[in-house]
Image (cartoon, helix red, strand yellow):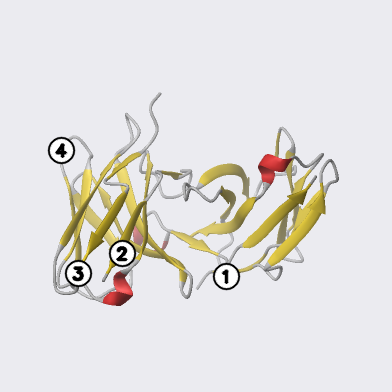
Amino acid sequence: KAGVTQTPRYLIKTRGQQVTLSCSPISGHRSVSWYQQTPGQGLQFLFEYFSETQRNKGNFPGRFSGRQFSNSRSEMNVSTLELGDSALYLCASSFGDPSTDTQYFGPGTRLTVL
Amino acid sequence: AQKITQTQPGMFVQEKEAVTLDCTYDTSDPSYGLFWYKQPSSGEMIFLIYQGSYDQQNATEGRYSLNFQKARKSANLVISASQLGDSAMYFCAMRDTHQGAQKLVFGQGTRLTINP
């Protein structure tokens, strides 16, 4: 069974630009969660999508948004990039039961903002 | 709110030795789940082991075992017979299901280095 895939793996953008990251979950998984990892803040939850609906959102500004498609693939978008948005963005997929699931992660997208 | 504390920023261990990575947690929920993930330098988070709060026995997965002490709120990861490939960051995490969503709360991690 194929694992979680994320594209692109690396991105370099400049301040003010916007970026879209993509995540394809494990087949059969309907939940996709996104996390930001930085050296200073560690791993922080961005948001989770289940059946095309956002179920929860972390404490991030509105510049961070996402969506999920009917095939469970998810995208996250960051508009008006800032230097502090440089990070490893990880997505994780699971079946969708918050009380029992294990989340499986993709390889991440490393975003550098210049 | 859930909180995970990993007090060891870095650990150095000789190959083939056993190693224990510490994790303490704080939650007011009676039902919770604890996870350990491994993150090599490539960046991918690899699931290692899971312990549920009502599980009667400590979880084991191959060379990984979880020393779960509920009263002390600790969930230490034990790696037996360490290998060079075990060198990585290790994260302890707790499931946070408030508001009905999937969310993991992570500790700050421990960087494990296995010396030959």
Residue at (47% x, 50% y) in the render: B43
Q: Is residue A51 left or right of residue B49?
A: left
Task: First in sequence, mark 2 or 3: give its number.
Answer: 3
Instruction: Tell me if residue B77 can be seen.
Output: no
Which secondary structure, mark 1?
loop
Give the letter of the chain under mark 4. Answer: A
Distance from disc 3 to disc 4, alpha carbons, whole Å, reads 32 Å
Name the residue tied to disc 2.
A112
- For label 1, the crowd category at 10 Å Cα-Cα, with few meaning under 14, some 14 to 19 and many 20 or more, is few
- Tag 2: amino acid: Thr
Residue at (80% x, 45% y) in the render: B116
- Tag 1: amino acid: Ser
Q: Which of marks 4 and 1 is in front?
A: 4
Residue A53 numbered mark, or none: none
Give the letter of the chain under mark 3. Answer: A
- Tag 4: amino acid: Ser
Are circles 3 and 4 on residues that touch, CB within 8 Å?
A: no
Are circles 4 and 2 on residues that touch, CB within 8 Å?
A: no
Residue at (67% x, 40% y) in the render: B85
Name the residue tied to disc 3.
A14
Closest to the observer: B10 or B49?
A: B10
> Percent x, y for residue A109?
33, 52
Name the residue tied to disc 1.
B28
Name the residue tied to disc 4.
A70
Distance from disc 3 to disc 1, alpha carbons, whole Å, reads 43 Å
Distance from disc 1 to disc 2, alpha carbons, whole Å, reads 38 Å
